[in-house]
Image (cartoon, rainbow, N blue to C red):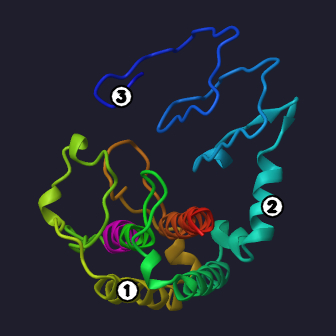
Amino acid sequence: MATDSDPQDFEGATFFKTSFKRATMRACDLSGVTMRGAEVDGLDIDGHDLLFGSLLVNGVDVVPLVDAELNRQFPGRELQNAQTPEGLRDGWVAVQAAWATTVADTPPEMVDAHVDDELSLAQTLRHLVLATDAWLRGGIMGIEQPFHEIGQIFTSAPEMGFDMSIFRTDAPTFEEILEVRAERQQMVTDFLVGATPELLVEERNNPWGGGDWHPTVGDCVRVILEEEWAHLRYIRRDLALLA
């Protein structure tokens, strides 16, 4: 079995009459994988970047179908790709209302519960603080060190050489998390109030550095919306499993 410290590369390999029943694959590159005559009952695929490519099932690209169904389940999600200030404002209002319902409906004893190594509700809200800091305070506003100390950084950050001393090593209380989260939500709200079409097309630097991509201000806001909707789906999925 491959582990994080002992990765195995199966690129280009062929598996014949091999059982992967009940196997779990995390952070694996499955792009271009071909399955023929495969038993897929109960196969569960969850990919954040699914909408940036195709997924063929019996010759049918199901990505547009998945996207449409998620928009049906999460009203307002379709606005995460809005190109106008009005659309982005409406999308932000919709996702914040959805989050408010989820937070209010979660029993206190469940805020730190999690499924396997997925983020808990408390950790998810901390990660959204980080996302807002990165893309609003860092990307759009250009603040040199935009991160709040309670932000939840992604697990591969230390290997990337990210300065982890920015963040607290102890777990903040849920009340602290909600307070900082509310501050960040208000920052986005205040920014969008004054956003104009001209501002949205201005270029900025990628807050995570590297590459030649220079996102526009609108791109940065859309990333924030994508993070909000994606993690809302994750946490609702996990809370339903825990229930």
Amino acid type shown at disc 1: Leu
Residue 61 relative to residue 80: left or right:
right
x, y percentage for residue 186?
A: 43, 90
When asked about the image quadrant of residue 90, the answer is bottom right
Q: What residue does disc 1 label?
A: 178
Where are the magenta residues, as a range? Answer: 129-141
Where 233 sits versus 185, above or below? above
Quadrant placement of the N terminus: top left
Label 2 crowd (10 A; few <14 / some 14-19 / many >=20): few
Q: What residue does disc 3 label?
A: 3
CA distance for labels 1 and 2: 30 Å
Q: Nearer the viewer, residue 101 or 12?
A: 101
Q: What residue does disc 2 label?
A: 69
Residue 128 relative to residue 172: left or right:
right
Among numbered discs 3 and 2, the one appearing first in the sequence: 3
Magenta stretch mostly in which secondary structure? helix
Where 187 sits versus 13, above or below? below
Q: Residue at x 24, y 77 (%)?
A: 172
Amino acid type shown at disc 3: Thr
x, y percentage for residue 108?
A: 44, 84
Quadrant placement of the C terminus: bottom right
Query: Is 219 covered by the magenta stretch?
Result: no
Q: How many marks?
A: 3
